[in-house]
């Protein structure tokens, strides 16, 4: 995934491009570059390394250009290098572009273009795009783009400029691109936060849209060149939401936002005595539904494990969930009537979108649960339920995870009603639990000192285990992922009953075991699993809503909550543990090595 920024107006473009790229760096940060046009001359400055290295390169430059494009890269084809950095230019250096996505037929196009005399200097798939547009360019950029993109296969968000025309042309196909509408100026970016300091008026480009930005107007056309009417929406996200607001890391800010986020996720969906999740209302399909097929990756996948348990417990409904990169290629016995539920914070994860398309091909109705308005998941789903978590900048997903589970709980409760499995008393019971959730989340955050103390013990370890059963096992999976991806400590999650079938061999003196226990019915079994660990010298850190008295364990008592709600509260526990441990280890936290915020490649 990469970040694109573009501007055309009356202000010097360079600082706008650099500041925009700094806000987009979470999307990719192995190289960066900008292109601008001044008096008919195209200038490209690009470098391997961060946006700050690019900014250092530009410190002495005196460019006064008023339109240009910028890019921060997460390499997919071609190693991070100055040459492979974007923007890429045509042979005559009259055209240039930046790209987010993957061109799948770039090899054959490259050979074809070389045979037609084009010279390539990079190893990227992107460079074939600018040569393809150059091939059709006869003085009108959008006309050349309409022709050129017919040759391309794959995913591409593009921003292009020509030295001969004062405009910016955008294309959106399977990768997001948003226009920012200013006074006598236009912006474009890969996501909304990069635009917030300049404008809240945005146009979210749709699949296949082509846009032409000029100083004082913009047009959106389709692939036949016909103008489209588009809606300029006023986003409610403020610039400060996309900044750290005084926290040392976006991740900690986003962890602490969760009481508010949970309130926002519930807003208008729960009244005093009624559940109102209209977005999930699929009419009379629900009472006879036989199955749900989930599609998700990583943390979102862990949320769907909890979602599956909700559907089983509350709706007596079967659900299939597996990581999207596996599920999309499986030939499962497809049953009907069934519904697809796609869960994705970014709404752009390639493997998750692969499952979405598969479910659509099989004519299943699809509900998308996503955090980003106008994302591919929201456009391609039949129904969309927004998590309303606000921009999640840190690569490690936190508030999106807990809000995804909350949406899944709301969905399961509303479907449970439709399937006559939730009587009025039960509904009121869960409404009370839901309304208390944001306050209980704050109570967990108020224990952060305890998590910090434990983190100080964990930072010295090389391996640690996470244990749980049922919903606590799914919490353990997410806990291990969070710890791995930001502290780089090796962590494994196991179902409590599974340890003795092999992994117990790894438990030795002082091996830390992080355990979750929120389900009374299986407490005795879990306690005997803990004994297996303790008797081999392992050290138990138990996070529980139950009253467990065991002096040899480090026990953190969590706020009482229904066992279906506990995974949401445990989400904050595992996040704080991972965060503080990573901070104690001196890790970078918001931008973990090798990872990007949204994996838009397969
Ligand atoms: C979460 O901490 C990870 N960064 C990663 O597993 C992420 O959840 C996964 O890539 C899915 O992303 P999505 O929710 O945007 O689809």
Image (cartoon, grey):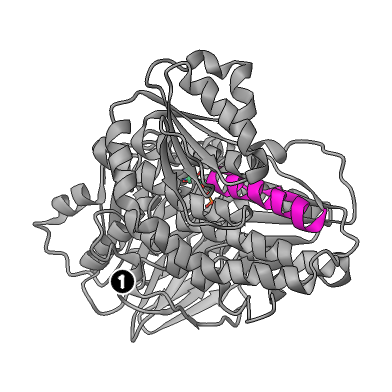
Callout 1 environment at 10 Å: few (<14), some (14 to 19), or many (20+)? few
Q: Is residue 186 left or right of residue 353?
A: left
Percent x, y of residue 343: 62, 55
Looking at this view, is 431 or 303 the one in front? 431
Percent x, y of residue 559: 48, 56
Q: From which residue to which does the magenta span run?
A: 293-316
Prevailing secondary structure class for the magenta stretch in the rendered image: helix
Q: Is residue 285 left or right of residue 521?
A: right
Q: Is residue 579 above or below residue 10?
A: above
Percent x, y of residue 85: 33, 44
Looking at this view, is 43 or 16 the one in front? 16
Residue 461 in view, yes or no: yes
Q: Residue at 15% across / 50% down in the picture?
A: 57
Residue beneath disc 1: 240
Q: Residue at 42% across / 45% down in the picture?
A: 556
Is 497 magenta? The answer is no
- Quadrant into which the C terminus falls: top right
Q: Residue at 36% across / 62% down in the picture?
A: 5
Direction top: furthest residue:
505
Q: Secondary structure at mark 1?
A: helix
Percent x, y of residue 437: 52, 65
Q: Is residue 448 left or right of residue 292?
A: left
Looking at this view, is 189 or 540 the one in front? 540
């Amino acid at each position: 995934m990469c970040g694109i920024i573009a501007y055309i107006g009356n202000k010097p473009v360079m600082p706008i491009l650099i500041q925009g790229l700094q806000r987009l760096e979470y999307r990719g940060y192995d190289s960066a570059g900008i292109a601008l046009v001044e008096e008919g001359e195209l200038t490209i400055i690009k470098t391997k390394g961060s946006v700050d290295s690019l900014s250092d390169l530009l410190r002495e430059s005196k460019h006064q250009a008023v339109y240009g494009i910028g890019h921060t890269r997460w390499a997919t084809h071609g190693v991070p290098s100055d040459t492979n950095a974007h923007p890429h230019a045509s042979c005559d250096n009259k055209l240039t572009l930046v790209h987010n996505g993957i061109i799948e037929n770039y090899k054959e196009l490259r050979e074809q273009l070389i045979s037609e005399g084009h010279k390539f200097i990079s190893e990227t798939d992107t460079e074939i795009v600018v040569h393809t547009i150059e091939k059709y360019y006869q003085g009108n950029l959008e006309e050349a783009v309409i022709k050129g993109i017919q040759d391309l296969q794959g995913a591409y968000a593009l921003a292009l400029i020509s030295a001969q025309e004062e405009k910016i042309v955008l294309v959106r196909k399977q990768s997001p691109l948003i226009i920012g509408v200013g006074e006598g100026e236009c912006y474009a970016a890969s996501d909304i936060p990069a635009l917030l300091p300049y404008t809240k008026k945005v146009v979210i480009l749709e699949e296949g849209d082509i846009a032409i930005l000029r100083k004082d107007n913009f047009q959106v056309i389709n692939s036949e060149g016909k103008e489209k009417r588009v809606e300029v929406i006023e986003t409610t996200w403020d610039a400060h939401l996309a900044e750290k607001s005084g926290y040392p890391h976006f991740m900690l800010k986003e962890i602490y936002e969760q009481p508010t986020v949970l309130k926002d996720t519930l807003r208008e969906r729960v009244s005093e005595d009624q559940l109102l999740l209209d977005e999930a209302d699929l009419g009379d399909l629900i009472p006879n539904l036989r199955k749900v097929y989930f599609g998700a990756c990583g943390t979102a996948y862990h949320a769907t494990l909890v979602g599956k348990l909700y559907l089983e417990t509350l709706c007596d409904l079967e659900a299939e969930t597996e990581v999207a990169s596996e599920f999309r290629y499986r030939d499962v016995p497809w049953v009907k009537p069934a519904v697809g539920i796609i869960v994705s914070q970014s709404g752009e994860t390639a493997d998750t979108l692969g499952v979405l398309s598969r479910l659509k091909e099989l004519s299943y109705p699809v509900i998308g649960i996503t955090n980003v308005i106008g994302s591919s998941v929201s456009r391609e789903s039949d129904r969309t339920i927004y998590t309303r978590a606000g921009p999640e900048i840190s690569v490690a997903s936190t508030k999106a995870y807990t809000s995804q589970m909350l949406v899944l709980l709301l969905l399961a409760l509303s479907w449970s009603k439709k399937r006559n499995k939730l009587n009025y008393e039960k509904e009121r019971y869960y409404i009370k639990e839901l309304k208390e959730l944001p306050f209980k989340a704050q109570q967990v955050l108020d224990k952060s000192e305890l998590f910090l103390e434990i983190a100080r013990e964990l930072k010295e370890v090389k391996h640690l285990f996470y244990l749980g059963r049922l919903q606590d096992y799914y919490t353990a999976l997410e806990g291990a992922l969070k710890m791995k991806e930001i502290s780089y400590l090796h962590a494994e999650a196991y179902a409590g009953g599974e340890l003795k079938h092999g992994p117990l061999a790894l438990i030795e003196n002082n091996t830390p075991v992080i355990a979750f226990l929120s389900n009374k019915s299986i407490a005795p079994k879990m306690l005997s699993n803990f004994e297996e660990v303790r008797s081999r010298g392992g050290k138990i850190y138990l996070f529980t809503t139950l009253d467990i008295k065991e002096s040899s364990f480090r026990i953190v008592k969590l706020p009482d909550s229904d066992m279906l709600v506990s995974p949401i509260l445990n989400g904050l526990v595992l996040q704080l543990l991972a965060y503080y441990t990573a901070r104690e280890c001196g890790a970078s936290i918001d931008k973990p090595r090798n990872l990007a915020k949204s994996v838009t490649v397969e």
